[in-house]
């Protein structure tokens, strides 16, 4: 379910310290019935076991395939447009103790680990269009339990990046995020089976 921006901005997450120059694009919640305050690692493991970003629903895979083809034609994903080339990684802004929390974490799809805490997992990606940060946070839910929240923060790369973000907004909101919601909520329900 889509949430107002304050559902992310009002939480005391560390990501706010390192992403002041990013724009908050989206905030979504994922129901995790019966989850307690210490279940964030269990949720992350359930998502990983369910296939992470590699195991998307067919419509999402189709959109990603089209995006990859167009990206190749337009040179959007060339290495010189990514992290450490066009943009400074957010991970380079972190104090060493926080940076060390991502050591040993594997990339998930296009996302590179930045850091992981007991209630946060932060990953980033960059290409010719944007520098993006995906923040997964564990927060109290309205039902008294806890829920997963995802925030997407971006720095568009010029006019092309702003146009790109505007163009993909309906696809994110109508297809990608709703299907991701079903996938991640199912991962929680079926964990441990």
Image (cartoon, helix red, strand yellow):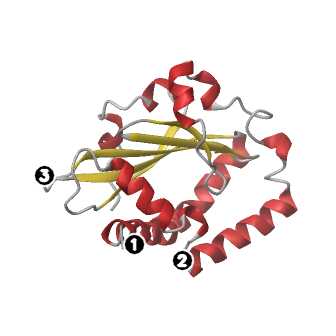
Give me the disc on residue 26. Answer: none
Query: Residue 141's spot in the image, x, y percent?
Result: 20, 51
Secondary structure, mark 1, is helix
Seen at 67% across and 53% down, the residue is 110
Q: Residues within 10 Å of mark 2 (few under 14, many from 20)?
A: some
Name the residue beneath numbered marker 3: 144
Name the residue beneath numbered marker 1: 182
Q: Is residue 132 left or right of residue 139?
A: right
Relative to 114, is 187 above or below?
Answer: below
Q: Residues within 10 Å of mark 1 (few under 14, many from 20)?
A: few
Seen at 27% across and 45% down, the residue is 38
Q: Residues within 10 Å of mark 3 (few under 14, many from 20)?
A: few
Observer-nearest of 26 and 163: 26
Secondary structure, mark 2, is loop
Query: Residue 92's spot in the image, x, y percent?
Result: 64, 25
Q: Are marks 2 and 3 in contact (CB under 8 Å)?
A: no
Q: CA distance from mark 2 to mark 3?
A: 30 Å
Q: CA distance from mark 1 to mark 2?
A: 9 Å
Name the residue beneath numbered marker 2: 57
Seen at 57% across and 20% down, the residue is 96
Work out whether mark 2 precedes mark 3 in sequence or the reverse, and give the earlier one: 2
């Amino acid at each position: 379910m889509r949430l107002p921006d304050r559902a992310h901005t009002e939480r005391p997450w560390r990501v706010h310290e390192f992403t002041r120059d990013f724009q908050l694009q989206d905030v979504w919640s994922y129901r995790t019935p019966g989850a307690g305050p210490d279940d964030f690692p269990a949720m992350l493991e359930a998502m990983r076991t369910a296939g992470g970003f590699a195991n998307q629903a067919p419509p999402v895979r189709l959109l990603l395939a089209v995006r990859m083809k167009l990206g190749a034609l337009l040179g959007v994903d060339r290495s010189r447009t990514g992290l450490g080339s066009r943009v400074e990684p957010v991970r380079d802004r972190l104090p060493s103790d926080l940076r060390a929390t991502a050591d040993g974490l594997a990339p998930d799809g296009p996302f590179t680990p930045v850091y992981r805490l007991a209630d946060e997992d932060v990953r980033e990606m960059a290409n010719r269009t944007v520098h993006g940060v995906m923040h997964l946070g564990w927060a109290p839910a309205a039902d008294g339990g806890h829920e997963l929240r995802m925030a997407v923060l971006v720095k568009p790369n010029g006019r092309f990046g702003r146009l790109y973000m505007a163009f993909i907004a309906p696809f994110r909101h109508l297809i990608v995020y709703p299907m991701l919601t079903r996938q991640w909520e199912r991962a929680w329900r079926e964990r441990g089976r």
